[in-house]
Amino acid sequence: MSKMTSVYDQLLVREHLAHASQPEVLSEAETARLQQSLIEQMQARQAVLIAHYYTPPEIQALAEATGGFVGDSLEMARFGARHEAKTLLVAGVRFMGETAKMLSPEKTVLMPTLEATCSLDLGCPADEFSRFCDQHPERKVVVYANTSAAVKARADWVVTSSIAKAVIEHLAAQGESILWAPDQHLGHYLQRVTGADMLLWDGACIVHEEFKAQGIRDLKKVYPDAVVLVHPESPAAVVDEADVIGSTSQLLAAAGERPQTTFIVATDRGIFYKMQQQNPDKRFIEAPTAGDGATCRSCAHCPWMAMNSLKQLLKGLESGQGEIHVPPRLIERAMIPLQRMLDFPVP
Ligand code: 13P
Ligand code: SF4
C-alpha cells in the first residue's frame, strides 16, 4: 500500500471535487416555496427525509418539520431501517444512502445527487482493499461506515465514529488483532486510546484533515475558557487539543452538557445549525483550518455535503433520479458486518 502525501493529491478525489458544485443561495421566499413543494411530494409518495448534521440548515429544518430525522450516520441508519415510509429521502453523502438501502432493500432510497461522495470512500477502492485484506487473513477487518457497499462486504465489522472505540475495545478484549480502514486519523486515535493491535489503511477526510492545532492554541489565548470539541477524523495534533473527542452526536451532546458558554468546534460547520438551535445562549466558533498566510481548501465544510439542496431533493422526488441501487449479492454479504454494528449495544 503506497502512502499518500495528501488526499487532495489523489486523482479520484481531485476529479470528484471538480464536480462538487456549491448550491446557489436562495431567497427566503424561494426556500419556503421549495419546502412547501417538498412537503406535498413527500406526502404523496410516502417519503421521509433523513438528513445528516452537515447538510444545509434549510434541509435539516425541513426534516425536523416533517417528522423526519437529523442525526449522525449511525442514527440515520437506525431511523431509516425502523421507519415505515415507502421512500427514504437521504440528504448526506452516498455511503449513507447505500447503508439505508442495504438495511431496507424493499424501500426506495433517493438522494439529492449521487455525485455526493466522501474522500474516505474514494480513497478505499474495493479491489485494492480486498487484496490488502487477503495479505492479512489473521486480522479482523473493521471498516468505517464511510465506505462503499463493496468494501463493507469485505469486512467483519462496520462501525461509525460513535461506536468505533467500544467495538475496538470489545475485539481487543477477545485477543483479536485488527485491520482498520479507511481513516488513518481515526485509526491512530483508536489505537492510542484502546492499545489494540491495529494495521491501518491510509485514507483521510479532506475536511477534518485541514484543522490546525496551532490555530486552536492561538484561539484558546483569545477565549481561554472555551471548550474544544474535536471529531476524531482530525489529525492527532488537533485531537491533542481537544476537551471532548466524539462523533457529531457526541459533540452536540457535549455542547449542551458543558456549563461553559464558548466552544471551539473542529468538525464540519453544518453542525452549527443544531448546536445553536439547542443552545441559543452559547457561542460556537469554527476551529481554524489554515496556517499563517495559507488558504484552506475545504474550509470546515464538506464540498459533497454542500451538494445537497432543496432543488435537488425536489427534482429527485419528482423524477425518481438519484435512486440508490445496491446489487443483492453485496447486500447479503455487507449485511453481516452491518447487522453486527446495529446489534452492538449503544455505548
Ligand atoms: P458521524 O458518524 O459522526 O456523523 O460522521 C460522519 C462523517 O462523515 C464525519 O465526517
Ligand atoms: Fe467524508 Fe469528510 Fe465529507 Fe464526512 S466530512 S462525508 S468524512 S469528506
Image: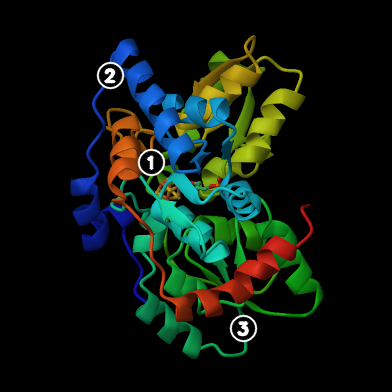
Q: Nearer the viewer, residue 121 or 213?
A: 121
Mark 2 crowd level (few <14, some 14–19, many ≥20, 10 Å Cα):
few
State the residue position of label 2.
Answer: 26
State yes or no: Cβ of the residue under disc 3 lies below 8 Å from any atom of ligand 1: no
Residue at the farthest top position: 281
| Residue at numbered disc 3 | 139
The residue where tag 1 is placed is 305
Is 282 on the left or on the right of 48, as rendered? Answer: right
Q: Is residue 331 visible?
A: yes
For label 3, the crowd category at 10 Å Cα-Cα, with few meaning under 14, some 14 to 19 and many 20 or more, is: some
Q: Residue at x 61, y 50 (%)?
A: 84
Q: CA distance from mark 2 to mark 3?
A: 50 Å
Q: Position of residue 50 (x, y in %)?
A: 52, 42
Residue drawn at (52%, 25%) of the image: 272
Give the left or right position of residue 296, taking residue 76 as reference.
left
Q: Secondary structure at mark 1?
A: helix
Looking at the picture, how far across and down is residue 4, in whole percent?
A: 33, 64
Quarter of the image that includes the N terminus:
bottom left
